[in-house]
Image (tube, rainbow, N blue to C red):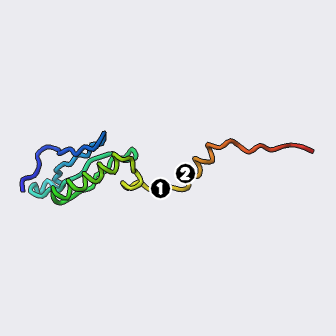
Amino acid sequence: MKSPESPIEVKRGSVTVRIRRVCPSKRYPDYFVLVLDYHEDGKRQRPFFATLKEARKGAEEVAETLARGRQQEAGAHWNPVSDLSASRRSRSPPQVSRGA
């Protein structure tokens, strides 16, 4: 199987996921892995795959999920504490009556 020389881009809507060939060791130049390259929640994600078929399937799944706006399913973790804090901040403080 001939490996890609330049990055392959998988696009869904405004989302682009790149598949790049990476040689993790200078000592073994014939050994390479395929790495997906995309950003999620402001962080760079780089999962790797052994074959181009697996990498393309993974890239298509990630691109579709991110294009639909489902960050939760793409691997982002929901934090109930931060959601609760945000909802508390959005509410106005309770009114206290100072009657005698």
Check the image and name the residue furthest to the top: 14
Q: Residue furthest right?
A: 100
Would you say the residues marked 2 and 1 are in contact, meaning their CB atoms lie under 8 Å apart?
yes
Q: Quadrant of residue 90?
A: top right
Find the distance from the CA under tag 2 to the CA under tag 1.
Answer: 8 Å
Labelled disc at residue 83: 2
Q: Earlier in the sequence, mark 2 or mark 1?
A: 1
Q: Quadrant of the C terminus?
A: top right
At which x and y percent is residue 11?
A: 25, 43
- Please, what secondary structure does the residue beneath circle 1 have? loop
Relative to 50, does residue 90 appear above or below in the rendering?
above
Which residue is pictured at 19% across the width and 54% down the height?
34
Give coordinates of residue 98: x percent, y percent. Answer: 86, 43
Which numbered circle lies on residue 61?
Answer: none
Residue 40 placement, left or right of 26: right
Q: Position of residue 59 (x, y in %)?
A: 25, 52
The residue under the point 29% across, 48% down is 63
Q: Amino acid at mark 2?
A: Asp
Relative to 35, 85 lies left or right: right
> Is residue 81 found left or right of 3 in the rendered image?
right
Under circle 2, the secondary element is helix
> Which corner quadrant of the image does residue 48 belong to?
bottom left
Q: Position of residue 46 (x, y in %)?
A: 28, 52
- Comparing 46 with 77, the one in front is 77
Q: Quadrant of the N terminus?
A: bottom left
Q: Give the label on residue 78, or none.
A: 1
Q: Amino acid at mark 1?
A: Trp
